[in-house]
Image (spheres, helix red, strand yellow):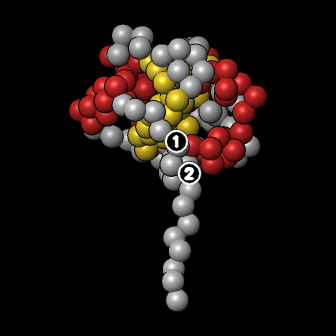
Amino acid sequence: MSHPLIQRLVDELHYVEVTVASHDEFVNQAGMNVLFFPGDPEVAKDATDVAVVLPELVDRFDGRLRPGIVIDTYGDGKTLKRHYGFSAYPSLVFVRSGDYVGTITRIADWAEYLEKISSFFDAAASRPPGFSIPVVGG
């Protein structure tokens, strides 16, 4: 399920809708690519907040962020969420020229966004965290 504030990103701002089929092509583009995973706005209440903040971040970083949005939460979004290993919606996943560099989950303070995103431009690439299952010894 989408929301007008989320759909606006595709319809009015022309953000790329990213699917499993288009994912690799999108994230392998040179520069900093950011995938917005809003989740279901009926469940992830701050999804619409991030949908409002993301264009402001794109403007603040003077076109250095290439935004894409994963609208299909329960299909392609579920597959891509597993790939990146984040645990909550909404999430912004940052991939620099095909290399994962970090994730910001849920809504954050403006200063936190600026600090984290700035650090991602220079961060070493790493593997996405993936899901971990705690092992309990007996």
Q: Residue furthest left?
A: 111
**Residue 84 found in image quarter:** top right
Up/down of 8 relative to 39, above or below: above
Look at the numbered disc 2 and give the secondary structure of its residue: loop
Q: In percent of the image, x 52 and y 29: which residue is there?
A: 99
Percent across and percent down for residue 28 are: 60, 21
Report the residue at 72% width, 33% height from top: 20
Residue 73: x %, y % from top left: 65, 42
Please tell me which residue is depicted at 51% across the width and 70% down the height of the picture. 134
Please name the residue that numbered disc 1 is placed on: 127
Is 70 displayed left or right of 45 in the figure? right
**Percent of width and height locating residue 118:** 31, 26
Q: Amino acid at mark 2?
A: Gly
Which residue is disc 2 drawn over? Answer: 130
Please say whether residue 72 is visible from this viewpoint. Answer: yes
Count the numbered circles shown: 2
Residue 5 appears in view: no
Q: Is residue 51 above or below residue 44?
A: above
Residue 27 % position (x, y) = 59, 24
Residue at image point 64% right, 34% down: 71
Q: State which quarter of the image contains the N terminus.
A: top right
Asked if residue 88 is positioned above or below residue 134 in the image, the reply reads: above
Q: Which mark is residue 138?
A: none
**Above or below for 136 versus 19:** below
* Local SS, label 1: loop
Name the amino acid type tagged 1.
Arg
Kindly indicate whether the residue at mark 1 contacts the one at mark 2 (C-beta within 8 angstroms).
Answer: yes
| Residue 118 in the figure: left or right of residue 102 | left
Q: Nearer the viewer, mark 2 or mark 1?
A: 1
